Image (tube, rainbow, N blue to C red):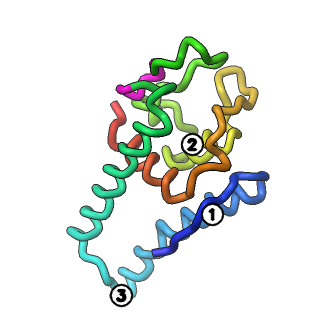
Amino acid sequence: MLSIVTVGFHGRFFNRQVVIMRKLLAVFPLVLAGLGVTGVSQAESDVDKQKSVERGAAHYRIFCINCHGEKADGHGPLTALLKIQPADLATLKRRLKPGESISDRVFLAVSGRHEVGDGKEKKMPTFNDNLEIKTVTEVADFIEVIQK
């Protein structure tokens, strides 16, 4: 598995590279499986995904819960202090654009380039220089399983 240390999310080019790399990494195991090359059983893959979701939940409690809330509904304890209402992450899937994944949207939000309501880009409070790609991926995995 590739491991990438702390990476800042600067510039459109880099963000596009991250999205492309994530999509390639998602497809690569399928290509290998099609060629009969597998090193991980479905059960092991499911266990890895579950561990990723569990780590994502722990990261969510550290980095996201104060704004997005215990139920990921956008009603965290710091919401009253914010200029912009945090997103309801539990229903994020309903608001995705065609072809967009939860992971894509989470990476855009962490990089500060997501659109909010009126179509203008709004920055979520930092984190874009402070989180590893793996951490953001795990948070996205967690957000995906809590969708209503």
Q: Which residue lies most toward the left here?
A: 43
List x then y, in percent, for residue 71: 36, 26
Q: In the visual, does 22 lie left or right of 14? A: left
Q: Within 10 angstroms of label 2, few (less than 14), some, or many (20 or more) residues? A: many
Q: Which residues are magenta?
A: 70-75
Residue that label 3 marks: 37
> Can you say which quadrant of the picture contains the C terminus?
top left
Q: Earlier in the sequence, mark 2 or mark 3?
A: 3
Q: Nearer the viewer, residue 89 or 62?
A: 62
16 up-or-down from 33: above or below? above
Residue shown at the point (67%, 49%) measured from the top left: 129
Question: Disc 2 or disc 3, which is closer to the eye?
Answer: 2
Mark 1 to mark 2: distance in Å?
Answer: 14 Å
**Alpha-carbon span between mark 2 and mark 3:** 32 Å
In this image, 51 relative to 68: left or right?
Answer: left
Q: Secondary structure at mark 1?
A: helix
User: The residue under label 2 is which amino acid type?
Assistant: Arg
Crowding near pointer 3: few (<14 within 10 Å), some, many (20+)?
A: few
Residue 130 image position (x, y, % from top left): 62, 49
Please, what is the three-letter code of the amino acid marked with disc 3? Answer: Val
Counting residues from the start of the chain, the first of labels 3 and 1 encountered is 1
Relative to 116, say whether 103 is above or below. below
Q: Residues within 10 Å of mark 1 (few under 14, many from 20)?
A: few
Circle 1 sits on which residue? 20
Q: Position of residue 16 (x, y in %)?
A: 70, 57
